């Protein structure tokens, strides 16, 4: 039960959603865009979030699209994580989405919610960074598109009133060898000690991480077919970690580094031996 | 565009029956199912999306009704455990003793029915992925898995009474 009231809006268009947000805000109230709603409801129960209005975006066609024209893959912000997995359009994104929370939650949790929510891991961002995705954002100032790395990485957040509409990426990334491995403290379901997404492109390892630092990030691409050992390559990668490694009750920084090293080495060996997918 | 403010009467399609209920926009679906409609087969556990006891089907997909507003269900097809009475999955749970105290059972049956509908012959990875959404404190997991395996390839009988 939520012990407070709010207004519920179900707009049909992006413009309606933006206008509602703007008008509610101008009344001095607090509106929230509402996709899957799992975070708003669970945080609302403990009064960490108390919206005056929720704007449900699940009826906006642009936010619900998922598909391809052969060259580009499109994922709407209101598309659920399970839909992404079941679609098989971008297997790496499907694997990353399939390791967030649990399967039933994935049937409710949306791509936009995972990208824009307050939980810091944003694991769907990893494949989208590696695939140089473009993000489309609506705001009272109009629609804009930008590389996702310029909008959501390094802890950058959306401005108030901005709404993620969709992401798009070149379909070529969906056919590259890939791996996604998430290691959590105890069970399969849980926040990551380390989540790594990887693509193998032209002999290069393209790697992105969540759980290692405060925000997800992408490593500089590194050649892995040059005779160096996996250990040596990982040592080089480690030099490129851009921020202090998390050190908290989920795992010490030394433990996270240890997990990162072993996991990255396994991915490199997997790419060298099988050139195929991996998930654990 | 739909706007709901304060208490409103909405129509919900649950187990192929249409119900009119008066709800606030912030009312949670599991509370409406149990307290207003008497569909108490859907259980309340953690109320935080962790345990899966409150799982229902929304358009055939499992959803934790403690993490869904009642107003979100407008226009969708809801199936609760009462809607799976007499189905192959329910019978398989009985035949394989796939429960002990039974509190988690409705949620498990709902997830299994959806799993088998979408993946009639699931591999172990898929079964494990789907079933990790639900907790059984009595640890009947192996029996639950056997009940699922007994229903392989019975797609048509999963959600229809037999």
Image (cartoon, coloured by chain):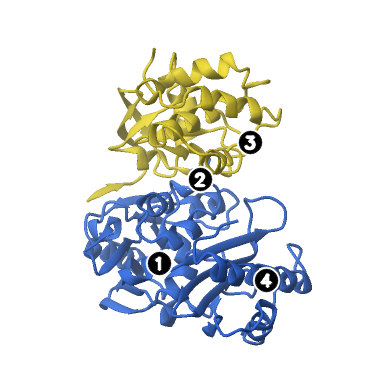
Chain colours: A blue, B yellow
The mark lying in front, picked from 4 and 2, is: 4
Q: Which mark is residue A28?
A: 1
Q: Which mark is residue B135?
A: 3
Q: Which mark is residue A260?
A: 4
Q: Residue at x 39, y 31 (%)?
A: B117
Is residue B40 in sight in this rendering? no
Instruction: Work out whether residue B17 or residue A274 is closer to the camera in this orientation and state it.
Output: A274
Q: Which mark is residue A103?
A: 2
Q: Could you tell which of marks 2 and 1 lies nearer the N-terminus?
A: 1
Measure the alpha-carbon separation of dots 2 and 1. Answer: 38 Å
Chain letter belonging to callout 4:
A
Q: Which mark is residue A250?
A: none
Q: Secondary structure at mark 4?
A: helix
Q: Secondary structure at mark 2?
A: helix
Chain letter belonging to callout 1:
A
Instruction: Work out whether residue B144 or residue B83 is closer to the camera in this orientation and state it.
Output: B144
How dense is the environment of label 4, judged by Cα within 10 Å: few (below 14), some, or many (20 and up)?
many
Residue A115: x percent and y percent?
A: 45, 66
Apparent side of residue B8 relative to residue B129 in the rendered image (left or right):
left
Asked if labels 4 and 2 share a chain, the reply is yes
Task: Look at the picture and state if A257 lies above or below A23.
Answer: below
Task: Look at the picture and state if B151 lies above or below A66.
Answer: above
The mark lying in front, picked from 3 and 1, is: 3
Q: Residue at x 34, y 36 (%)?
A: B59
């Amino acid at each position: 039960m939520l012990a407070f009231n709010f207004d519920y809006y179900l707009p049909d268009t992006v413009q309606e959603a933006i206008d509602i947000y703007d008008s509610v805000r101008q009344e001095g109230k607090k509106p929230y865009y509402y996709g899957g709603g799992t975070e708003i409801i669970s945080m609302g129960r403990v009064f960490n979030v108390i919206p005056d209005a929720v704007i449900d975006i699940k009826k906006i066609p642009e936010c619900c699209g998922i598909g391809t024209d052969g060259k580009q893959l499109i994922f709407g912000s209101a598309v659920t994580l399970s839909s992404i997995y079941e679609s098989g359009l971008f297997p790496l994104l499907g694997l990353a989405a399939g390791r967030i929370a649990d399967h039933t939650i994935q049937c409710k949790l949306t791509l936009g919610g995972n990208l824009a929510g307050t939980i810091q891991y944003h694991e769907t961002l990893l494949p989208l960074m590696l695939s140089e995705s473009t993000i489309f954002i609506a705001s009272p100032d109009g629609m804009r598109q930008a590389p996702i790395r310029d909008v959501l990485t390094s802890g950058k957040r959306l401005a108030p009133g901005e709404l993620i509409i969709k992401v798009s990426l070149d379909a070529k990334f969906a056919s590259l060898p890939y791996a996604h491995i998430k290691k959590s403290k105890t069970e399969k379901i849980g926040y990551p000690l380390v989540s790594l997404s990887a693509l193998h492109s032209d002999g290069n390892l393209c790697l992105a991480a969540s759980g290692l630092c405060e925000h997800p990030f992408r490593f500089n691409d590194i050649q892995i077919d040059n005779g160096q050992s996996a250990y040596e390559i990982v040592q080089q990668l480690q030099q490129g970690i851009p921020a202090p490694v998390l050190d908290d009750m989920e795992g010490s920084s030394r433990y996270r580094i240890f997990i990162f090293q072993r996991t990255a080495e396994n991915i490199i060996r997997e790419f060298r031996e099988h050139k195929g997918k991996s998930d654990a | 565009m739909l706007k709901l403010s304060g208490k409103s009467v909405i129509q919900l399609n649950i187990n192929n029956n249409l119900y009119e209920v008066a709800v606030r926009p912030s009312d949670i679906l599991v509370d409406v199912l149990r307290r207003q409609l008497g569909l108490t087969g859907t259980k309340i556990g953690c109320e935080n999306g962790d345990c899966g006891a409150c799982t229902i089907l929304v358009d055939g997909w499992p959803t934790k009704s403690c993490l869904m507003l009642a107003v979100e269900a407008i226009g969708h097809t809801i199936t609760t455990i009462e809607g799976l009475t007499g189905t192959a999955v329910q019978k398989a749970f009985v035949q394989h003793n796939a429960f002990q105290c039974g509190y988690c059972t409705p949620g498990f049956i709902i997830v299994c029915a959806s799993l088998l509908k979408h993946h009639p012959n699931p591999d172990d990875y898929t079964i494990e992925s789907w079933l990790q959404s639900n907790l059984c404190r009595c640890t009947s997991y192996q029996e639950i898995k056997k009940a699922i395996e007994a229903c392989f390839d019975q797609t048509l009988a999963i959600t229809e009474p037999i």
